[in-house]
Amino acid sequence: MRQEAPAPAPRTRSAVPPAPRRLAPAVSRPPAPAAGQSTATGGPVAGQTTAPRAPAAQQAASPLNSAVRKASSGRPAEQSRGRSKRAGKAAGGRSREEVGWVKAHGGSGATSLVEALGGVDVGDRWPEPARGEPYRIVLVGRTSASGLRSVSRALGALKDGNAPQGLELLAVVLVADAPGRLPIGLLRRIRVLRSVAHVHRVPWIPAWRTDSPMKYVPRQLVTLSRLVGSDVYGEGARS
């Protein structure tokens, strides 16, 4: 008998699949950002809109940016660098360089002198130069008997050291308590005061009594304005 050749074995696929073909990735350009958008690497996410940025020069010149920079550094946004006309301003608007008018008693006329010549109305106390208050002072009192006694007591306290250190007495100003000449007894008391301090007398000024403008400026007031360094009546004063 004829023997038949055995049938060839069927081909089987390999268990290991062949390596896939590597294809170059497709390169695609991202769509151009719309107005107000930027790329993800340099700005906000796509889809969000922002206001266009101003040039650097404009940002530097912006007053708002300047104020923010100053506030972040601990400084106020606006700070005046100019000095006051009167140097050395202290609390309450007072100046150490101004003249302090000290009242020896109530109703001495110091307030009227401050309104006319300027300076600081200290009141019936001694100023304290250590706290920035005026160190140059003028002691003011009336020419009445009680007024002269108050002036004498104040001068005694100043001489005995019962006042703050550093005070400089420019003068004692005696304001007339009434029109006319003074009695002899009051003139003698004033003579005693002249022996210990520079005394300057101011005559009776009716305008101060009625709170009206002065028709003329007494020469004594002109001299006093020069003494305290005020130029209110320095020129054109008529006595």
Image (cartoon, rainbow, N blue to C red):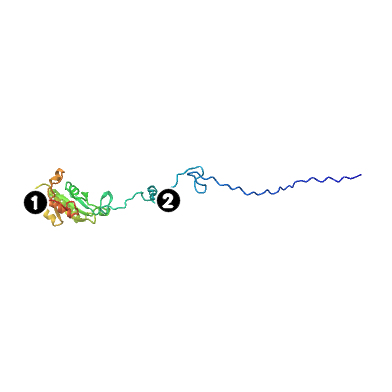
Q: Toward which corner of the image does residue 168 lie, by quadrant?
A: bottom left
Residue 116 horizontal side relative to residue 59, left or right: left
Counting from the top left corner in percent of width and height, residue 118 is at 20, 50
Q: Which of 199/151 is in front?
A: 199
Mark 2 lies on residue: 56
Q: Secondary structure at mark 1?
A: helix
Q: Nearer the viewer, mark 1 or mark 2?
A: 2
Report the residue marked by disc 1: 185
Residue type, numbered disc 2: Ala
Q: Which mark is residue 140?
A: none
Marks 1/2: CA–CA distance: 83 Å
- Residue 207 drawn at (x, y percent): 14, 45
Q: Residue furthest right?
A: 1
Query: Would you place residue 231 above or below residue 35 in this image?
Result: below
Q: Which residue is rendered at x = 26% and y = 49% of the image?
A: 93
Of label 1 and label 2, which has the lower sequence position? Answer: 2
Mark 2: few/some/many CA within 10 Å (<14, 14-19, 20+):
few
Q: Are marks 1 and 2 in contact (CB under 8 Å)?
A: no
Viewer-closest of 227 and 182: 227
Q: Around disc 1, counting alpha carbons within 10 Å, would you say few (fewer than 14), some (14 to 19), or many (20 or more)?
A: few
Q: Secondary structure at mark 2?
A: helix
Query: Residue 55 location, x and y as percent?
Result: 43, 49
Looking at the picture, tell me which residue is in the foreground, 121 or 197: 121
Tell me: residue 212, above or below residue 165: above
Amino acid, disc 1: Gly
Q: Which of the image's four quarters has the N terminus?
A: top right
Residue at image location 13% in from the left, 56% down from the top = 194
Give percent across and percent down for residue 231.
Answer: 19, 53
Q: How many marks?
A: 2
